[in-house]
Amino acid sequence: MGQVEFYKRRLIRLQPMVVLGSVIGAALFYVQAGAFFPKIAETPVWQMLFVMLLGFTLLPLPTAFDIRGWDEMHPLNGPAWSLFFEYIANIGYAVVFRKLSRRVLGVLVVLAASMLVDIALRGERRDLIGGWSLDPAGLHIGFARVAYPFLAGMLLMRIGKRIRTRHGFAISSLLLIAALALPRMGATPHH
């Protein structure tokens, strides 16, 4: 089985979870009505069901289909924005990235890291929050958030330098807990 066929099957296999996420989002849609989601109360059922059906495709929806009021590309299945960018990265791998040399891949990793650091340090909000909106700023953050880890992981696998750590799961868990326990850094006020 070739690489392209492998990724086609993988994408098809993940699709039922996308459908289930949209169905659960639709089932609980009107429960969320209130101050945080101003458009929910005025959204007719037919429009919500139409957005649910479009959500099954994982295609990003323009702001005209925003039914919650937060300019999300997947209003009923919020985390699907991340999966959308991962799908694009996997398609990029199947079509282009797997053919690149280590040197070119290394240059792309440095560029992707630079883009991510630029957003974190010089961006409008000085953080990496975003990517779920189908506007230039959201797409820029979304592609930056997927490009570096995806390409760096590819480069590490190509080089063959895997870091073996005893108790790696426990150490990673503690580091993750510490990172999530830290307060927000930076001078930007909370909104």
Image (tube, rainbow, N blue to C red):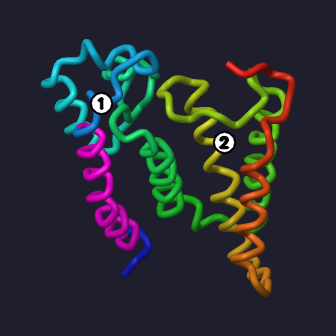
Q: Compared with residue 47, is residue 156 higher up or lower down, i.e. above or below?
A: below
At 36% from the left edge and 82% from the top edge, which residue is drawn? 1
Q: Amino acid at mark 1?
A: Val
The mark lying in front, picked from 1 and 2, is 1
Q: Main secondary structure of the magenta part?
A: helix
Q: Amino acid at mark 2?
A: Ala
At 52% from the left edge and 23% from the top edge, which residue is drawn? 135
Residue on which the image places disc 2: 144
Horizontal relation, residue 124 to residue 11: left or right: right
Q: Which mark is residue 31?
A: 1
Horizontal relation, residue 150 to residue 125: left or right: left
- Find residue 150 and report its image quarter: bottom right
Please state the extent of the stretch shown in magenta in the rendering: 5-26
User: Which of 18 and 115 lies nearest the eye of the viewer?
Assistant: 18
Helix, strand or loop under label 2:
helix
In the image, residue 50 lies at what x, y percent? 18, 30
Horizontal relation, residue 27 to residue 92: left or right: left
User: Which of 149 and 129 lies nearest the eye of the viewer?
Assistant: 129
Q: Compared with residue 110, is residue 27 higher up or lower down, i.e. above or below?
A: above
- Find residue 49 and report its image quarter: top left
In the image, residue 111 lies at what x, y percent? 77, 46
In the image, residue 54 lies at what x, y percent? 24, 37
- Find residue 155 and report its image quarter: bottom right
Q: Compared with residue 168, is residue 87 higher up or lower down, i.e. above or below?
A: above
Specify which label sits upstream in the sequence, 1 or 2: 1
| Residue at far left of view | 46
Residue 6 lies in the magenta-colored region: yes
At 54% from the left edge and 59% from the top edge, which residue is drawn? 96
